Image (cartoon, grey):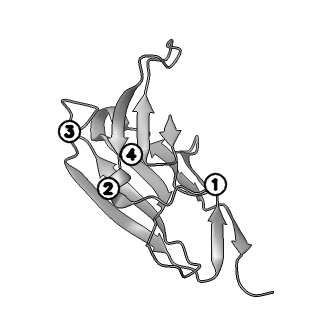
Amino acid sequence: MVEQEGIILVTPKSGDGSQAAEFLNITNRNPNSGTKNGLLSIAFHPDFQSNHLCYIYYHKRTGSVALSVPQCLSEWKFPATTRTGWIRHRSAFFWIFRTLCQPQGGLLTFGRDGYFIWASGTEEWAGPV
């Protein structure tokens, strides 16, 4: 489960969500958790069981009054011994900076062919009319 505020929870497949445990917390990266922003998506690499890689997509709060919300796509690697808490490696490898636009939504996934798919969502013009 992905929460816009920056927390990703995992739960057993057969569970009802009551046993959810924190998988990743990026609240310290200040995701801009507005109505359509914040932490938007996570995609686990098709070989996650062996390479322990996942990818997250979020909009970062900058604290600026400017109408620009940076969008970040980052890779995270977890140790083989645990699936929660301890992150061994992380890197932001793609940023989008657009002025006077309010990004809305987004999705990460891997296709059946193993290719990575990133949909950055729609954008709403926030400039003068």
Q: Hey, what amino acid is under mark 3?
A: Pro
Q: If you read the primary sequence from the N terminus, does the residue marked by circle 1 or circle 4 appear first?
A: 1
For the residues labelled 1 and 4, say whether their Cβ atoms are less than 8 Å apart.
Answer: no
Q: If you read the primary sequence from the N terminus, does the residue marked by circle 2 or circle 1 appear first?
A: 2
Query: Considering depth in this image, is 6 or 74 the residue closer to the camera?
Result: 6
Asked if residue 95 lies left or right of residue 107, the reply is left
Q: CA distance from mark 1 to mark 3?
A: 33 Å
Disc 2: which residue: 28
Q: If you read the primary sequence from the N terminus, does the residue marked by circle 3 or circle 4 appear first?
A: 4
Disc 4: which residue: 54
The local secondary structure at tag 4 comes to strand
Disc 3: which residue: 79
Rendered location of residue 108, percent (x, y):
55, 50
The local secondary structure at tag 1 comes to loop
Asked if residue 104 lies left or right of residue 15, the reply is right
Q: CA distance from mark 3 to mark 2?
A: 21 Å
Disc 1: which residue: 35
Q: Hey, what amino acid is under mark 2?
A: Asn
Query: Considering depth in this image, is 65 or 54 the residue closer to the camera?
Result: 65
Q: If you read the primary sequence from the N terminus, does the residue marked by circle 2 or circle 4 appear first?
A: 2
Q: CA distance from mark 1 to mark 4?
A: 25 Å
Q: Residue at 40% of width from left, 60% of height from top?
A: 30
Q: If you read the primary sequence from the N terminus, does the residue marked by circle 1 or circle 3 appear first?
A: 1
Q: Where on the picture, by quarter, is residue 126?
A: bottom right
Q: Residue at 35% of width from left, 51% of height from top?
A: 26
Does 129 sit above or below residue 116?
A: below
For the residues labelled 3 and 2, say whether their Cβ atoms are less than 8 Å apart.
Answer: no
Q: If you read the primary sequence from the N terminus, does the residue marked by circle 3 or circle 2 appear first?
A: 2
| Tag shown at residue 107 | none
Q: CA distance from mark 2 to mark 4?
A: 18 Å
Q: Hey, what amino acid is under mark 4?
A: Cys
